[in-house]
Amino acid sequence: MQSHIMKAAVLYELNKPLEVKEVEQPEILPNEVLVEQDSTGICYRDILTQKGFFPRVSLPIVPGHEISGRIVKKGDDVRGFNVGDRVSSLIYVPCGKCEFCLSGSENLCPYKKTFGEMMNGAYEKYINIPEISLVKVPDGVPAPDASIAACVTGMIIHAISRLGKLQQGQNILITGAGGGVGTHAIQVAKALGAHVIAETSSPWKSEQLYHLGADHVVTGKEFNKEVKDLTGDGVHVVLESVGLPTFERALRSLRVGGRMIVIGNVDPTAVPLPLGLIILKGNTIKGSISSTKEDVSKALELNKAGKVHSVVYKTVSLSEVNEAYDDMLAKRSVGRIMLKL
Ligand SMILES: [Zn+2]
Ligand SMILES: [Zn+2]
């Protein structure tokens, strides 16, 4: 096969718009496959990368890490996958050898390399992926669901199920519920049998959040009081995906023995941490990063069962990527903006 010349959206300089350029696809290595993508998700993380929040970014870079598609070529050392297989990829390449990789917590691998940050990512039609990052996609899973299985659905499963230990019948508060993460978190929490309270600072999104399965939507600045009124004693789990604007109110929404799982931070300013509150209520705060291959498999099973579907706000072309970033920054979008490749 000839090497591909293809269009890619490229970040050349921090805080500057992306540029669509022709790039040459490098030849795959023996441990890699070449994946042909149909589309990819635009993630808030890509905007944070553009803004310089990730100091390890190596410029110029093709951003994006929400990768799925069909294998069109494979290297000689690839054993578990074949040409024609549908796959989803982790958002990173783990080392495969450290204590975290060997114990099924490859999301914590200190040597992992993230697509779109340290290696070229998904804002291009063809992408080389090492076998160690791949998960097979079961039949019947729609393409956008497969694209966001690692970054969104699997990451949520890791946070609220594996770390948050959310059980059937328990209450969960999801902050920033109108965003790309929150709209899917509502569905995952409902699939786990939880009672879901969705928080959004954009009240016009309420109707859609109910439609996705939220039992209650809270929109006030002091939403913790609404949560207390709804639950009596607070929620078992908070999925905190915003950071400074919601953190303290979210913490005050927890019941005794509650768990807050922090997965997002839109503002690098430190948050106030009322220690007395944590001590007296025996609450825990845990950070959660990304997903493992097991989480991605669970995500794809929920997609296959029809319990979780991707919420796509709109699909745009590569040349419209900068406008899509503006839409996300202005909170105009409900759910994911997909990039057609
Ligand atoms: Zn993402
Ligand atoms: Zn590792």
Image (cartoon, rainbow, N blue to C red):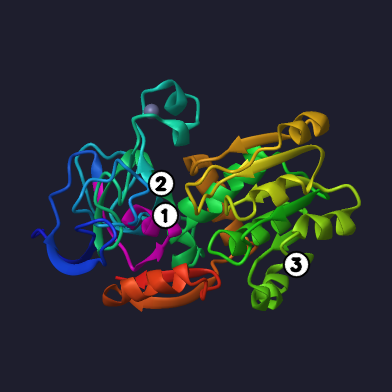
**Regarding mark 1 in the picture, which secondary structure is present there?**
helix
**Regarding mark 3 in the picture, which secondary structure is present there?**
strand
Which disc is residue 90 wearing? 2
Contact between labelled residues 1 and 3, with CB atoms less than 8 Å apart: no
Expressed as whole percent of the image width and height from the top left, the position of residue 209 reads 68, 70
What segment carries the magenta color?
33-50
Expressed as whole percent of the image width and height from the top left, the position of residue 314 reads 45, 78
| Tag 1 residue | 45
Visible residue check, residue 297: no
Q: Residue at x 46, y 69 (%)?
A: 328
Quarter location, residue 184: bottom right
Q: Which residue is drawn at 41% across and 76% down?
A: 315
Looking at the picture, which amino acid does disc 3 mark? Val
Which of 177 and 106 lies nearest the eye of the viewer?
A: 177
195 inside magenta stretch? no
Question: How far, Cα to Cα, is label 2 from label 3?
Answer: 32 Å
Q: Earlier in the sequence, mark 2 or mark 3?
A: 2
Mark 3 CB in 8 Å range of ligand 1? no
Looking at the picture, which amino acid does disc 2 mark? Leu
* Structural crowding at the residue carrying mark 1, measured as other residues with C-alpha within 10 Å and reported as few (<14), some (14–19) or many (≥20): many
Which disc is residue 217 wearing? 3
Expressed as whole percent of the image width and height from the top left, the position of residue 273 reads 66, 38
Looking at the picture, which amino acid does disc 1 mark? Arg
Look at discs 2 and 3 and give the one toward the viewer: 3
**Regarding mark 2 in the picture, which secondary structure is present there?**
loop
Q: Earlier in the sequence, mark 3 or mark 1?
A: 1
